[in-house]
Amino acid sequence: MLSATVTESGQITLPQEIRDRLKLVSGSKISFIIDEDGQVKLFPLNVPVEELSGILHRSGMKKTSIEEMDMAIYEGANDWT
């Protein structure tokens, strides 16, 4: 198991093995996602969008159509009015 220590200012140094695996270099950006189970996942933002396909998939999750996504966006936008 790899680990890191949080400094007083909230910073950490990612272990070299993690940086290599994610192809991170100085100045790389990363994103954090907390899933429905409360697990924190880290994703590099320096990858082609095609490689991100399926990263949020969970077992048993129903696929959503473009039409369903459009409807959810429409309904969410109308909640603002």
Image (cartoon, helix red, strand yellow):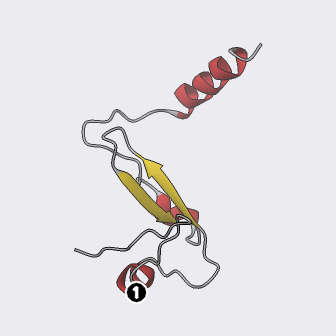
Closest to the observer: 23 or 59? 23
Q: Is 41 on the left or on the right of 23, as rendered?
A: left
Query: How far from the left and from the top, in percent, is residue 8?
Result: 51, 66
Residue type beneath disc 1: Gln
Residue 4's place in the image compared with 17, above or below, is above
Look at the image and tell me in which quarter the N terminus lies.
Answer: bottom left
User: Between 43 and 8, which is closer to the camera in this rendering?
Assistant: 8
Q: How many marks?
A: 1
Q: Position of residue 51 (x, y in %)?
A: 48, 65
The structure residue drawn at horizontal position 48% and vertical position 63%, both measured from the top left corner, is: 43
Q: Circle 1 sits on which residue?
A: 16
Outermost residue, left side: 1
Residue at image x 68%, y 15%? 79
Q: For the view shown, which residue lies furthest in the right direction?
A: 81
Q: Residue at x 59, y 72 (%)?
A: 46
Q: Nearer the viewer, residue 60 or 22?
A: 22
Q: Position of residue 65 (x, y in %)?
A: 49, 32
52 over 76 or under it: above or below: below
To which quarter of the image does residue 16 belong?
Answer: bottom left
Q: Quadrant of the C terminus?
A: top right
73 sits to left or right of 43: right
Q: Residue furthest front?
A: 8
Q: Residue at x 35, y 84 (%)?
A: 17
| Quarter occupied by residue 36 | top left
Of 79 and 37, which appears nearest the observer?
A: 37
On the image, the x and y values in percent for residue 61 come to 32, 36
